Amino acid sequence: MDVQPMLTRDLVLRVCANSTEFDEGWTAAESKAAVPFLAPRDTALIDAVVAAAADVGVNRLLICRTRAEFAYEPVTDAPANTAGIVDVIRGWGDEPTDVLIVVEDLSAAVIITAEELTVAAGPDDFVRAFTGADIPEARAEFGEQARLGRDPELLRAAQRYGCLEIGGRHARGNRGPGPDTAERLAERAHAFREGSPGAVRALRAVRGAAGWLAVAVLAAAAVAVPGVGAVVPVALGMLWLLIQLALPARSRTVGFATLLRVAALGALAVWPVAFAEQTVLGLLGPGIPDWTGPTYVAVPVEEAGKLAPLLLVWLLARRRVKRMSAADHLLLGAAAGAGFHLAERGLSAAASGLAPASTHYGLFTLLPGWSEVPATGTVFAGHAVTTALIAGAFGVAAVGRRHHGPWVWALPPLAVAVAAVDHMHYNADLAGVDLAPATAFFAALTGNGALTRWLLLLLLAGAVLMDHRLARLTAETTPPLPGAEPLAGLRRAALGRAVRARVRVPGDIAPVFRRTALAWIRLPTTLACGLSTMLHELAVQVAAARRGPAALFAAWRLLRWRRAHAMGAARAGGRPWRRHPARERLEATRLLLEPARPGTAAGAVGAVGAAAALVAAVPLAAPARLPGGPGEPGYALAALQTGMAWFDGLPAGSQAWAAAAGAALLLLASTGWSVPWSPPDARALLRRPGAEAVVLLGSAAPGQLGYGALALLGTALPAAAGRVLKPSPAGRVRSPADAA
């Protein structure tokens, strides 16, 4: 039985609003990039259509005329080559007409009007065949051209596709909500760096000297006071945990310095959490069993209290939080939990004089800080892991709810349940009590806590993939990365497979089955495009490292700022949002890092700092009995009481050293971990030894040594490393002005 061909009317109604414009609902689906442009009516435009089809891996295209008089003509299924498309158009006669060319699954299309206006819409790989790598710049150029030419048709197209702000001069305006506290501080810091470079160099030198002084104080305190040295492995273990999570989080937009500052806030949160636990125990009365504190009181109070630093971040940087990725939420939760873990286990280790043998902090330990009860085999993944699990689940729900539906809100309750059961099971074993049958059943599902760390890694991988997919949907507003994107063949194969598979999905099946099928079809494309983006970022870093420390540091900032810009656009969903830093700064940094442009990149500004909190010590009464053995507190209240008892038992001189060690740890966590702004110039060291020595001291803070070491390794790379980043392809259809 022959299949009746699709009529032009059916195809145009699905894709177009009229004969020369795309339907807004169609372009909004999957956040298609839509770019209008002017191009002469010659074979170069058809070649661009063929190239766009090849970039999304298809070899057949649907072609029809969009005007009403051709509504009942059949749609032509033509091969995606220049000769085939030209033959179809010539078969219609010599009279100019409006033409629609669509990919088979309706995921991308081109409207070629009878005049010079052309509109391409679809995935970024499809649109770049017409506009080149910089889609936002092409849209801005069209908006400027329409504004200057005063052509009503062009002005309408520019406003319809967002190339011009309604009521504004052009699309480059930075309209949206005003700055928050963190952004105001960042702008003032930027102005201070630009206006007073000498004072900035002096302050950086003071910071570097203070950091090394803190290291010396900590080393001296470890020798002078028994117990302080046992805190150092705990601190290094938490630092190593954050590094292990930050390195694979290739969609993060927060700097490592911000994570360390949040960790310092998490350590200070031990005092209010312990006070809340004591208050709850006092309200319950003196007749409660001893195991009530570490189980039914400590678990909910601590898991909620560890999230308090994230609430402070939201209060100080509300606009910034709306540009964070799902991986950012996970990392901030891990930082808050790591600081809490450091304070709780550090106080216990100081009191006992050694780190607990059942807690693992080794160099080759996956996510250090996890503990186990040897007698029962129960594993506690650590405060950093449980808090990261909860914050990461909330981040996935907050970031992905608009694109993946309300089902993602099932993740936060599941994460809270896993963290609570993991924590409660461990504390109950330490207190020597048995779990309720229901709690024991849920604990067995996670392998008695052994699987919690792997669940966190699985959540991190899903968050990174989701972030990259959402960032890909903002190609029409996000500046591209320098150079050409790698793995074009893999992306082409994945996109072509998705097109062929979507065509075979019936449109009349149940919505839940259709959404499931489309999500399964989209998964390989998400994996291929995410891998391509991550390799592209790696190539940018390698090429920048070969050019010197300044270029490498600028590349690191550009990557984070670009991700933040993309996530802000994705989460805004078309509503006004705060762009910080402005797109002009991102564009200037990107151009300096382009492989075709020699020179050294200068740093731009945009980091968001976290504010420090002042927490007063709360006097706590000693309990009748502390559950758990020495060095293994059941909960924060017991750890703080043990630490305070140890501190009170020290001589006056030792107390001063212990207090200095705590202040040194907070200082080291709060300062000196940001990417350096102005690295020293070795060639100017002989000409200006004094000034360059100040710059060297400012760039040699303890937390910045890792950045400097990577920069030095980059300069030792062979010359071929600078060529891993290929120049961006032109790939643009010539406009009439270019042809002239």
Image (cartoon, helix red, strand yellow):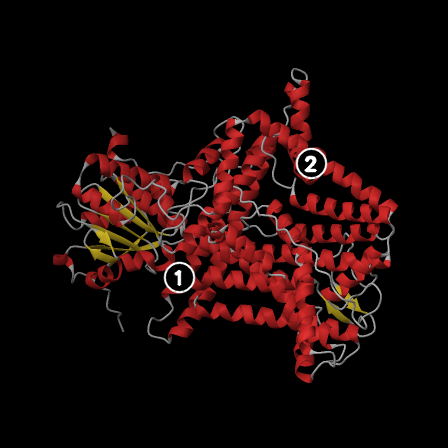
Answer few, some or many: residues within 10 Å of disc 1's Cα (few below 14, many 20 plus, some between 14 and 19). some
Is residue 387 depicted above or below 153 in this figure? below
Which of the 4 image quarters holds residue 715?
top right
**Residue occupying the point 22% across, 62% down:** 13
- Residue at numbered disc 1: 500
Residue 310 has which mark? Answer: none
Quadrant of the image for the C terminus? top left
> Dot 1: what SS?
helix
List the single residue furthest toward the top.
687
Three-letter code, disc 2: Ala
The residue positioned farthest toward the bottom in the image shown: 437
In the picture, the quarter occupied by the N terminus is: bottom left
Q: Quadrant of residue 58?
A: bottom left
Q: Which residue is mark 2?
A: 701
Q: Nearer the viewer, mark 1 or mark 2?
A: 2
Q: Would residue 470 appear left or right of 713 to someone viewing this image?
A: left
Residue 625: give x, y in percent of width and height: 81, 72
The answer to whether the residues at label 1 and label 2 have Cβ atoms under 8 Å apart is: no
Q: Nearer the viewer, residue 358 or 201?
A: 201
